[in-house]
């Protein structure tokens, strides 16, 4: 194990042995960051053994698995957060130390504490080749659009601000309106954080976009429209979802013409965010109304594809179809391999830090639901998995809000708002 002390807070190293963890604690380290994906070598300890050994040694532990080609800002920010939360010196490792140091130095560069022209010399001083960090920054500077993600740990949802640096115009995609089903409390913490970011960057909100009516959180689209005056939009097939749930809720007065949004988008429709062209792909399967937004080199794929280590989205909601989901995914994978894909949820398998950005090429190579998979094989896999999944805990709460564009129920005579949902309305669901 080659360990290099970067400063009083950080040491980077190659793979430690499990037996080393107790001595690292004795040396005064307080936290371990494992930046190495499982399975790189047959004899590496792996995430779960390292986590157990760290706990036994009294060390905090973070799992931020990265490779050079797949490193994203989410990984960099997770590394920073682990450093902030550490109650003392941090021991960060990968296979040889380079990726761990790259995560650190990229955070310093993004926050302006080190210049891009200083990075390679910094690496050389400590015995590492950081040319990959420079290339990462160059790719990021060239990418359009600029994408800022907001992760909501309560619902594992990812919200996005997609902006055009040439005009300062932006769109907000899939914003979350906070709701606690235990108390019935609502709040706007997530949406207000997005508004604060928009203001801090001097952006102007042009669109508020939903990819589909969500089953696991309330949409903040209506709230954000009130705050910004921006147009709202969703896929045109939302009218079918409204009619389906109108019956389930016994809600004859519900308008099922999609008039709750400013624009209903058909497959192939185009619009702009500033000077950036946006193309709409129809992506049914998870729901019958789902769409994907393709903006420059980025595609917002909602609940079709998750990160490669998490597979694909379920297709058993009312109106869902595993066969249609397969076709939708194939259309997304027909985009250029370098296209950035931004997913709608991340459930953090193995306890790793949240991630939300991959590429078409990475999904083709690494997603076990897709690599070397046939259509019939996917359908069998997806339907078998879905049979064992319980419904999202907020599905009956959220749909009555989200099929109205994020509008809460109107106040009743006492000034309070009330949700309504059917008992035994989703027959055959797994408890």
Image: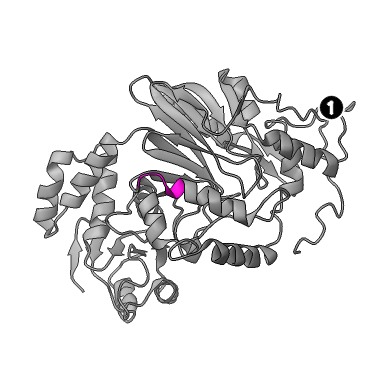
Q: Quadrant for the C terminus, please.
A: bottom right
User: Residue drawn at (41%, 21%), measured in percent from left and top?
Assistant: 274
Q: Position of residue 129 (x, y in %)?
A: 14, 56
Residue under numbered circle 1? 415
User: Residue drawn at (20%, 51%), measured in percent from left and top?
Assistant: 132
Magenta stretch, main secondary structure, is: loop
Q: Is residue 111 visible?
A: no
Q: Is residue 335 magenta?
A: yes
Q: Is residue 78 above or below residue 93?
A: above
Q: Position of residue 37 (x, y in %)?
A: 36, 66
Q: Quadrant for the N terminus, please.
A: bottom left
Q: Is residue 279 visible?
A: yes
Q: Position of residue 258 (x, y in %)?
A: 70, 28
The magenta stretch is 332-336
Q: Nearer the viewer, residue 22 or 365?
A: 365
Q: Is residue 274 magenta?
A: no
């Amino acid at each position: 194990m080659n360990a290099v002390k970067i400063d009083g807070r950080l040491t980077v190293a190659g793979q430690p042995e499990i037996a080393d963890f107790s001595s690292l604690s004795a040396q005064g380290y307080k936290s371990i960051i494992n930046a190495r994906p499982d399975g790189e070598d047959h004899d590496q300890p792996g995430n779960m053994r390292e986590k157990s050994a760290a706990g036994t040694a009294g060390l905090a532990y973070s799992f931020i698995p990265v490779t050079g080609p797949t490193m994203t800002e989410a990984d960099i920010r997770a590394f920073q957060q682990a450093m902030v939360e550490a109650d003392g010196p941090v021991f960060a490792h990968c296979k040889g130390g380079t990726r761990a140091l790259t995560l650190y130095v990229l955070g310093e560069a993004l926050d302006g504490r080190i210049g891009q022209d200083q990075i390679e010399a910094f690496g050389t001083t400590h015995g590492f080749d950081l040319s990959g960090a420079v290339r990462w920054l160059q790719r990021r500077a060239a990418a359009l659009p600029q994408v800022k993600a907001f992760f909501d740990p309560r619902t594992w949802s990812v919200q996005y601000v997609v902006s055009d640096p040439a005009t300062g115009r932006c769109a907000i995609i899939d914003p979350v309106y906070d709701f606690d089903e235990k108390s019935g409390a609502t709040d706007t913490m997530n949406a207000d954080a997005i508004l604060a970011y928009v203001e801090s960057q001097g952006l102007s909100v042009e669109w508020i976009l939903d990819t589909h009516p969500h089953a696991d959180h309330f949409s903040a689209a209506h709230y954000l429209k009130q705050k910004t005056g921006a147009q709202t939009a969703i896929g045109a097939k939302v009218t079918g979802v409204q009619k389906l749930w109108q019956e389930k809720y016994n809600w004859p007065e519900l308008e099922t013409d999609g008039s709750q949004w400013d624009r209903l988008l058909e497959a192939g429709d185009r619009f702009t965010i500033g000077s950036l062209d946006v193309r709409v792909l129809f992506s049914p399967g998870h729901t019958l109304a789902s769409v994907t937004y393709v903006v420059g080199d980025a595609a917002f794929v909602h609940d079709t594809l998750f990160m490669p280590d998490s597979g694909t989205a379920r297709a058993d909601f009312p109106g869902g179809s595993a066969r249609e989901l397969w076709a939708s995914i194939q259309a997304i994978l027909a985009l250029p391999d370098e296209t950035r894909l931004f997913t709608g949820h991340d459930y953090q398998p193995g306890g790793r830090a949240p991630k939300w950005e991959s590429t078409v090429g990475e999904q083709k190579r690494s997603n076990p639901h897709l690599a070397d998979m046939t259509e019939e094989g996917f359908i069998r896999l997806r339907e078998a998995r879905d049979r064992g999944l319980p419904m999202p805990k907020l599905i009956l709460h959220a749909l009555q809000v989200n099929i109205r564009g994020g509008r809460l129920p109107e106040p009743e005579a006492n000034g309070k708002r009330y949700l309504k949902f059917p008992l035994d309305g989703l027959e055959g669901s797994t408890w």
